[in-house]
Amino acid sequence: MAGKTHTTDAATQNRESHPVTLSAGQLATASNDTGYVDCGRPLVAVVAPMVAAVAACLIHVFIPNGQNLEPTWMDPISVWQQPYPIVLQGLFLVSLFLALLHWQCLPARPWVRYYAPLLAGAMFLFGVDDLLSQKLAWLPWPFFPGPGMVLGCSIEDCGIIFSSTWHSLLLLVSGYVVGVCMGVLTGVLIGWFPSIRYWGMPLLKVIGPLPATAMVPAVMMLSNDSFIPATALIGFAVWFPVTMLTSSGMSNVRLSYLDVARTLGAGEWYLIFRVAIPSALPTIFIGLFMGLGVSFLTLIGAEAVGVPGGLGNYIKAQQSSMEYTKMYGAWLVTAVLFSGLITCLFRTRDWVLNWQKGVIKW
Amino acid sequence: MTATPGEPSPVRGRIADAAALQVRDVCKVYPSPDGGEVLVLDRMSLSVRPGEMVSLLGPNGCGKSTLLRMIAGLDQPTSGDLRLGNQPITAPSAERGLMFQDPNLFPWLTVRRNIQAGLVARGVLREHRHEAEEFLRLVGLEAFADVYPHQLSGGMAQRAALARALVNRPAVLLLDEPLGALDQFTRMRMQDEVVRLWQTRGTTMVLVTHDIDEAIYMSDRIALMTPRPGRIDRLIDITMPRPRQRTSPQFLELRTAILEMLNFAGGAKDGSA
Ligand SMILES: Nc1ncnc2c1ncn2[C@@H]1O[C@H](COP(=O)(O)OP(=O)(O)O)[C@@H](O)[C@H]1O
Ligand SMILES: [Mg+2]
């Protein structure tokens, strides 16, 4: 399996987990050495996306609708030119390009073989969803619209979805940053200084677990402008796990590291910033991941119950007006946004904790 | 007690200004798990001359590590007095380096940055950066300077730890079974390395070891310790010239003598110390 690396010399130390460039010599062992897991059969991997794209397209175009759809703006357009089939056609072209790349460009091979089956799987899921809802109507309209309806109707609202996304992102990032800064600060203080720990820990245990969304109505009363209270709310929700994990990481530093540092002439400053915090970083990152998860929940929850604007608000509104297609569309955008943020955090961690590579398996 | 001063070792430069290490009547009591107290060191005394290499040889649990930690300033004695020169030892300081059996390199720093740690901690990296490079070279790790510790072999990691401990040019270097985890070949090579660094630097060294050959090969004096509560049982001067031969008759004779003192010579001897 890839991922398990036995690095013993300097030459291999900088190996990336996602290398895109490989020399021809390395290709002999490409599937084992690149960090990409191969799905097994190269031919299948490369052809599958094209097959999936064609299949999904054929399902959508040629199987008659089973659901009793309401009229939409797409009705006058030929089915081949509606958004969903156009996207599938585009994905078919992408698949074709990937196959050519695999054929012609040796360095890209492991990369193609890694991503092609995932792409095929995604399109396969769309096809199945289409079949179950819109085409065979095993799932009832309007609660389960097919991908064609979701995409088509959401495009109508793309302006407002975009501005809601921007609004949510801004709120999320500012709340998260505030929460993380406060959390790391209090975590370091509580984890390092016993007297602060004595008072801080009970306080933390009492107020930390309060659900932030329950405070929305009260917090919204405080100010006309919703941005600052909402930021504070998300910050509070993030603060708790970050503080907990940071303080736990700080107080679990290996004592021998501190002893060594002291005999090297280290003062308190060095012990905190150059020993305890670096050694606590892996734990701190767990707190950052938990905080990110909590911030998503708090954001959507807060927007749904009262903070104006944003994706949570939009989703709630579409739900109330039974516009389920648009609601799913906004869900999809939310999912992509959140997973993008999680990916960013993963990348940051990989970069900051570069030294852990080879010590533990991620 | 045969604490007669031996001949000072010949190959030594700047030791005149170094200070002697004095351990006087030190007792150390630890709380025992059952709620009582354990006397780990009982009125232990030892004096180490400037630039000398002294080995502490004794059974497990006799308090060797405890003694080194107190000399390093990491622990305080229950009673008694520790001094370096005229200064009482009260807290850790860069003039007393400590090296453990586990190299304890900071895993988040590269080898070079680990070796620079002491300079950073004292805030003198800018002025003394070249010294870190010098020690990197002295322990033969230039090629591994930018590698993280987990990529080093045991011997290399221990050499890096040695360089890190030496970079502050401590007056005293305390070594707690530093080579204990290494295989026999690596260990013998590292012994030569430590002796070489000791001879060029003139650092006072206190070496805890389980290995009788290592003690004879490296030290000016060997202090045999009693089982708990620990104290010095005998001091043995090693006057053999350096570089020493592990196979010389003198060496083997000394080895036999020490084994007999420890009642490990074999045969059916009465085992009371
Ligand atoms: N921090 C401590 N708390 C309680 N007992 C300790 C502590 N450190 C050492 N001891 C006890 O002191 C004794 C001597 O330990 P140590 O100095 O490590 O022995 P050595 O290094 O000679 O093997 C051991 O019995 C150990 O259990
Ligand atoms: Mg010990």
Image (cartoon, rainbow, N blue to C red):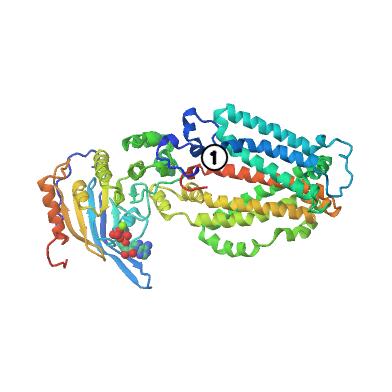
Q: Is residue A59 above or below residue B177?
A: above
Q: Is residue A228 left or right of residue B34?
A: right
| Ligand 1 position by quadrant | bottom left
In the image, farthest residue toward the bottom: B35
Residue B228 location (% of width, % of height): 26, 65
Q: Quadrant of residue B248?
A: top left
Count of numbered circles on the image: 1
Q: Residue at x 34, y 71 (%)?
A: B37
Q: Quadrant of the N terminus of chain B?
A: bottom left
Question: Ligand 2 within 8 A of label 1's CB?
Answer: no
State which quadrant residue A126 falls in: top right
Residue A264 location, x and y as percent? 39, 47
What residue is drawn where x is 69% and y is 43%?
A: A124
Q: Is residue B270 left or right of residue A31?
A: left
Q: Residue at x 76, y 46 (%)?
A: A130
Q: Secondary structure at mark 1?
A: loop
* Residue nearest the observer in this picture, A232 or B25: A232
Q: In this view of the protein, can residue A350 be seen by the observer?
A: yes
> What's the residue type where badge 1 is placed?
Tyr
Residue B38 drawn at (x, y percent): 32, 69
Residue on which disc 1 sits: A36
Quarter of the picture containing the C terminus of chain B is bottom left
Q: Is residue A105 left or right of residue A163?
A: left
Give the vertical position of A80 relative to A149 (above or below). Answer: above
| Image x and y of residue A267, in percent | 45, 49
Asked whether the viewer can see residue B78, the reply is: no
Q: Mark 1: few, some, or many residues within 10 Å (few <14, many ≥20)?
A: many
